[in-house]
Amino acid sequence: MKKMLIAGAAALSLVAVSAPLAGAAEGGAPALHGVDGKTFGKVVSDLAKSSPGALADHVSGR
């Protein structure tokens, strides 16, 4: 029973550590959206000022 508990905890730890890396794009969010970092920052800033909830909706997939 103890071995099973340790194995389960180890598996959950591996998933928790590797899951964020699997979805990461090379070059980050700007590259994922096809723009440079400066442009991306301006667009995100402008959107956050005009409609704060839009960013949360976009990153959560809603």
Image: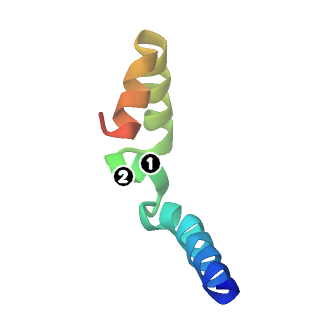
Nearest the eye: 22 or 35: 22
Assess disc 1: are there few (<14), some (14-19) or many (≥20) residues with their C-alpha within 10 Å of its C-alpha: some
Q: Amino acid at mark 2?
A: Leu
Q: Residue 2 appears in which quarter of the rendering?
A: bottom right
x then y, percent, for residue 57? 36, 29
Tag 2 secondary structure: helix
Q: Residue 3 appears in which quarter of the rendering?
A: bottom right
x then y, percent, for residue 17? 60, 68
Tag 1 and tag 2, C-beta contact below 8 Å: yes
Q: Amino acid at mark 1?
A: Ala
Give the residue at mark 2: 32
Is residue 47 shown left or right of residue 62?
right
Tag 1 secondary structure: helix
Tell me how the rendering is colored.
rainbow
Residue at image coords 47%, 19%: 48
Counting the numbered discs, the total is: 2
- Give the Cα separation between the discs numbered 1 and 2: 5 Å
Is residue 5 shown left or right of residue 62?
right
Q: Is 23 rendered above or below residue 35? A: below
Assess disc 2: are there few (<14), some (14-19) or many (≥20) residues with their C-alpha within 10 Å of its C-alpha: few
x then y, percent, for residue 51? 40, 14
Give the residue at mark 1: 29
Q: Which mark is residue 56?
A: none
